[in-house]
Image (spheres, rainbow, N blue to C red):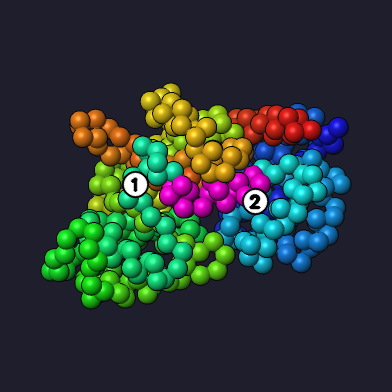
């Protein structure tokens, strides 16, 4: 028997809040759930109150909906994920669960999907400085690479790295740490030139703490044509964003000047169908979790040997995907319907 009640989890403060102290897409979702005849409330998470919340929330709500940007979590991400696990153990439906959030949202999801055609087989993940130093210098000798930290947002810690020195080594052989490299950060397309060893040391900040990792993948020159993001509610594609970088850049963030075009899924039917066909296998590779409530899959264009377009998966996001630009499309109603469907299906 369900309580017909859900709680949306937020935190106080942060640059993603409106004048009312909430994310701009939170209250529309709350009202959409209420319009279905269910109770919906917003609770602010804090690490100081976690024990109290673990006791009180399962008694009053069927499910939680996490709407917290990982960069804004008080007490750190690890403590928050443990908190979500406690709620799940107490019987609450997680949207998403802590483990699904990690499985879908961590950058190394790409490495787990390397056996699929949509992920290049020369995609790597590094979890410590020793393996990073040893392996990245070999990958860089094969061509231009893109490094992505696991944390961050809006392009922070995403670097295009290219060898510009005179050193010549066979592809797959390590470049010396004295080699000169040109590094472009996606957050604003700014460029730095330095020795490889100096840059590797700089990246050490991305490897520490909970979830520290760096993902390394081949640079795709056709990124200048834009990144294609599919936004899903459950397994239902809702809209597609075509994000074209500013002239001369490779970053697809609004902050860097990229231009966004919002399309219906039908305008990208071939890509949507391709991804949905692979989705069951993707879920299996990522641990068998249900699809998150609100999530995205980002693609870049490449070219197949026969000259036709290919789509390469760049990343999956599910921690706190926003859709404030599309409230007029009624996405909040789709979210509410998905929440009720999942809760009723697990009652």
Q: Is residue 168 above or below residue 232?
A: below
Mark number for residue 121? 1
- Expressed as whole percent of the image width and height from the top left, the position of residue 38 reads 79, 33
Which quadrant of the figure has residue 170? Answer: bottom left
Is disc 1 surrounded by few (<14), some (14 to 19) or many (20+) residues within 10 Å? some
**Segment colored magenta:** 96-112
Residue 341 visible in rendering:
yes
Question: Horizontal and vertical percent for residue 42?
Answer: 74, 48
Q: Quadrant of residue 288?
A: top right
199 with respect to 96 (left or right)? left
The reply to whether residue 324 is visible in this rendering is no
Whether residue 298 is in magenta: the answer is no
Q: Quadrant of the N terminus?
A: top right
Does residue 217 sit above or below 4 in this rendering? below
Magenta stretch prevailing secondary structure: helix
Whole-Å distance between the Cαs marked 1 and 2? 28 Å
**Which secondary structure lies at badge 2?**
helix
Disc 2: CA contacts within 10 A as few (<14), some (14-19) or many (>=20): many
Tell me what residue is drawn at x 79 percent, y 40 percent.
Answer: 62
Residue at which label 2 appears: 98
Quadrant in the picture for residue 141: bottom left
Q: Where residue 189 appears, x then y in whole percent?
A: 32, 59
Q: What x and y, as percent, mark residue 102?
A: 57, 51
Q: Pointer 1 and pointer 2: residues touching (CB < 8 Å)? A: no
> Is residue 306 shown left or right of residue 207?
left
Q: Which mark is residue 58?
A: none
């Amino acid at each position: 028997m369900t309580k017909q009640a859900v709680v949306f989890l937020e935190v106080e403060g942060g640059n993603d809040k409106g004048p009312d102290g909430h994310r701009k897409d939170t209250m529309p979702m709350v009202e959409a759930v209420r319009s279905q005849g269910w109770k919906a409330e917003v609770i602010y998470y804090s690490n100081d109150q976690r024990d109290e919340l673990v006791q009180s929330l399962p008694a009053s709500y069927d499910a939680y909906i996490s709407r917290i940007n990982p960069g804004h979590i008080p007490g750190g991400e690890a403590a928050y994920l443990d908190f979500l696990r406690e709620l799940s153990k107490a019987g609450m439906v997680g949207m998403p669960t802590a483990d699904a959030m990690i499985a879908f949202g961590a950058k190394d999801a790409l490495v787990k999907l390397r056996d699929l055609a949509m992920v290049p087989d020369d995609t790597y993940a590094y979890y410590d400085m020793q393996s990073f130093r040893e392996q990245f210098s070999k990958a860089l000798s094969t061509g231009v690479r893109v490094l992505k930290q696991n944390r961050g947002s809006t392009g922070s810690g995403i670097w295009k790295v290219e060898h510009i020195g005179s050193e010549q080594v066979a592809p797959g052989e390590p470049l010396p740490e004295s080699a000169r490299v040109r590094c472009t950060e996606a957050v604003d397309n700014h460029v730095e030139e330095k020795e490889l060893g100096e840059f590797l040391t700089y990246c050490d900040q991305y490897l520490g703490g909970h979830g520290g990792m760096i993902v390394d993948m081949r640079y795709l020159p056709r990124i200048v044509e834009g990144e294609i993001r599919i936004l899903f509610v459950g397994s239902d594609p809702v809209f597609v964003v075509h994000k074209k970088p500013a002239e001369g850049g490779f970053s697809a963030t609004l902050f860097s000047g990229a231009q966004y075009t919002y399309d219906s899924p039908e305008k990208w039917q071939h890509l949507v169908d391709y991804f949905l066909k692979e989705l069951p296998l993707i879920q299996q590779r990522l641990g068998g979790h249900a699809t998150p409530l609100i999530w995205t899959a980002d693609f870049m264009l490449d070219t197949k040997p026969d000259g036709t377009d290919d789509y390469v998966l760049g990343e999956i996001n599910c921690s706190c995907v926003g859709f404030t630009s599309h409230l007029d499309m009624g996405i909040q109603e789709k979210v509410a319907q998905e929440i009720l469907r999942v809760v009723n299906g697990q009652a």
